[in-house]
Every structure is written in C-alpha cells, then in structure tokens.
Image (cartoon, rainbow, N blue to C red):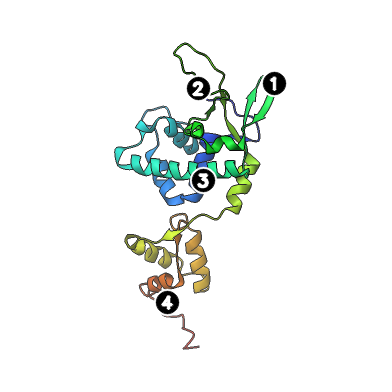
Amino acid sequence: MNRFCPDGYVPTQEAIVRAAEYWFPERFAALERAAAPQSETKPDNSLEALARALSQPSGIPDALLHEFRDIVNQTVHQLRSFLHRGKLKAHYFGHDGCHSVSRDFWATAQADGVMESGIYWPFGKPTRLYEWRPNYSLFLLQPELDALLSEQPAKKRPLPKAKMPDLVAALRELDGLPNRSAQLQALCNMPEFREFKITNALFRDAGRHVPRDAGRRSRRES
C-alpha cells in the first residue's frame, strides 16, 4: 500500500533513488532494470520499483545485490551528511502539524536505517513486544533536494577499458557534428557516459579509430 505524500515533499526512499540516479547514473541504470518486479503487478514507475527494493532487496538478483547495497550505502551516507550539516531537513507530520528532525539526530546510531525504511520514531523504537510508540513517514522537501542535487556535481570515474569500443561506436554516430569540440560535448552528455570522465587524451585516442570523411579536410590541409 502506498503511503500518502504531501505536495512539495519527497519520501526519503524516493530521495535516495533520485540522488543515486544523479550521483551514479550508469550503475543506477543497471540496477533500475534489475529491480523490476518479477510479478505481473508492476509499479507505476522505475523510481517506485527501486524504492520498494530498498525495503525488499530479495527482488534484486544475487549478482547485483552487492552493487545495490554499495550504491545505497554511499548515497545514504552523503544524504545523512547533508542533513547533519543542515543543508537538508527531514520532516514528518503528526496530528499537530509538520515537524523537523533535529540535525544532530543524523550523526547518531539511532539514525541507521531510518532513511532506507522511510519511518521515523520520535521516541525510539519499542523495546518490548507489546509496547507501542508513535512512528511517522519521513519526507524531504522536494525544492531543497532538487537544489542540492543541482549544485552538487556528479562524481565521475575513469572510463573502463572495456567501454572503449562503446565510446568509439558512439563517436562514429556523431560524425555529422561540425567539429571535435561538439562531438566531445555530445559524448559527455550521453547517459551511458555521463558517469565517466572523458579526457581530451581519451577522446583523441577514440578518434583515431574513427575514419574521417573523405570530403572533410583537416586543418593542415586547409
């Protein structure tokens, strides 16, 4: 059953997914495909599928489970750091209105697993079997999250050698662009390469494998 989400807010599970999609685009894309439920009942979108996998990781194939947990752990660690520093605020709604979680809470062991579960216990979890304590769904403000992601550049890692043929093939498809600068910019904007740092040296190496148009003269010939 889906929990109600007030307008302008994002459940913490969805916030994790959005941040992971921005910070780890290629790794996220692979997990997005793997997290699709096996049953006939499908979620409304891929965000919901991966958010559901946070609480039900059994739906992830064993081969990708370690990768899934690694991305989640890294993403949650960064988000908790922003929450502790006050760059983000987490909110929950009680009968008396909206409340903010103390920034100091995110530096404690009690915060472990809270973002992943999407549930906040203001007075801690029950310690006895029949004890009841209030708990609430946890949200982030969507404008705050969007602003944070837009100002935090995605971390880029070196392009693996195994992806060099893909880079060359993509460069061939961009042969119609006016110059190498435009081709490099287009490559960097492609979803499959957005996670990687494509240096000028790497781009030149890929260009050596792409034959030039016979009708196009080099600078030396002009």
Q: How far apart are marks 1 and 3 (CA)?
A: 31 Å
In the rendered structure, are the residues bearing label 1 and label 2 in contact, judged by CB atoms less than 8 Å apart? Answer: no
Left or right placement of residue 114 versus residue 31 in this view: right
Q: Name the residue under label 1.
A: 96
In the rendered structure, are the residues bearing label 2 and label 3 in contact, judged by CB atoms less than 8 Å apart? Answer: no
- Locate residue 7, reporting x and y percent: 65, 32
Q: Dot 2 lies on which element?
A: loop
Q: Which residue is drawn at 49% across and 62% down?
A: 188
* Front of the two marks 1 and 2: 2
Q: Name the residue under label 3.
A: 78
Crowding around mark 1 (Cα neighbors within 10 Å: few <14, some 14 to 19, many 20+) is few
Which tag, 2 or 3, sits closer to the chain's start? 3
Which tag, 4 or 3, sits closer to the chain's start? 3
User: What label sits on residue 213 in the rendered view?
Assistant: 4
Seen in the picture, residue 222 relative to 194 is either above or below; the reply is below
Q: Nearer the viewer, residue 119 or 121?
A: 121
Crowding around mark 2 (Cα neighbors within 10 Å: few <14, some 14 to 19, many 20+) is some
Type of amino acid under label 3: Gln
In the rendered structure, are the residues bearing label 1 and label 3 in contact, judged by CB atoms less than 8 Å apart? Answer: no
* Front of the two marks 4 and 2: 2
User: What label sits on residue 64 in the rendered view?
Assistant: none
Residue found at the very far top of the displayed protein = 130
Q: Mark 2 points at which residue?
A: 125
Q: Residue at x 39, y 37 (%)?
A: 35
Which tag, 1 or 2, sits closer to the chain's start? 1
Crowding around mark 4 (Cα neighbors within 10 Å: few <14, some 14 to 19, many 20+) is few
Q: Distance between the residues labelled 4 and 1?
A: 70 Å
Q: How far apart are marks 4 and 3 (CA)?
A: 47 Å
Type of amino acid under label 2: Lys
In the rendered structure, are the residues bearing label 4 and label 2 in contact, judged by CB atoms less than 8 Å apart? Answer: no
